[in-house]
Image (tube, rainbow, N blue to C red):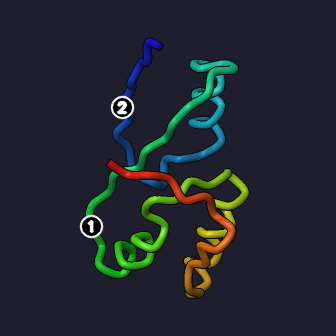
């Protein structure tokens, strides 16, 4: 299978509906894998480390983000564990 990789470098504040619409326009009905790379932040890194090795849906991601924003511990039970390496 041939794959294509595109890198977008932007600030998190630039992620809005226009960006999502542009992705939909560019990639149409293709399946996407989105990887986020950011500067290390000790508190955020500790919190997100709990999700390493898991895969989750957009709805599960929204729940994780809401928990993090509210200062709650990220709950990984119910997420699908994937092999790394």
Counting from the top left corner in percent of width and height, residue 27 is at: 59, 20
Compared to residue 79, the image places residue 13 above or below, namely above
Counting from the top left corner in percent of width and height, residue 60 is at: 68, 61
Residue found 62% across the figure and 55% down from its top: 56
Q: Which residue is mark 2?
A: 7
**Residue 77 is drawn in which quadrant?**
bottom right
Counting from the top left corner in percent of width and height, residue 58 is at: 67, 51
Compared to residue 79, the image places residue 41 above or below, namely below
Q: Nearer the viewer, residue 64 or 53?
A: 53
Compared to residue 52, the image places residue 75 above or below, namely below
Residue found 45% across the figure and 73% down from its top: 50
**Residue 43 is drawn in which quadrant?**
bottom left
Of the image marks 2 and 1, the number of the one nearer the N terminus = 2
- Dot 1 falls on a residue whose secondary structure is loop
Circles 2 and 1: CB distance less than 8 Å? no
Q: Nearer the viewer, residue 10 or 82?
A: 82
Q: CA distance from mark 2 to mark 1?
A: 19 Å
Q: Which residue is mark 1?
A: 40
Check residue 73 in the rendering and tell me which mark sits there, or answer none: none
* Label 1: how many Cα within 10 Å (few below 14, some 14–19, many 20+): few
């Amino acid at each position: 299978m041939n794959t294509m990789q595109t890198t977008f470098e932007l600030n998190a504040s630039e992620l809005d509906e226009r960006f999502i619409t542009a992705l939909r326009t560019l990639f149409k009905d293709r399946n996407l894998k989105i990887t986020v790379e950011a500067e290390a932040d000790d508190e955020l890194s500790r919190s997100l480390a709990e999700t390493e090795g898991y895969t989750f849906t957009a709805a599960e991601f929204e729940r994780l983000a809401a928990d993090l924003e509210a200062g709650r511990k990220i709950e990984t039970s119910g997420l699908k564990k994937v092999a790394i390496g």
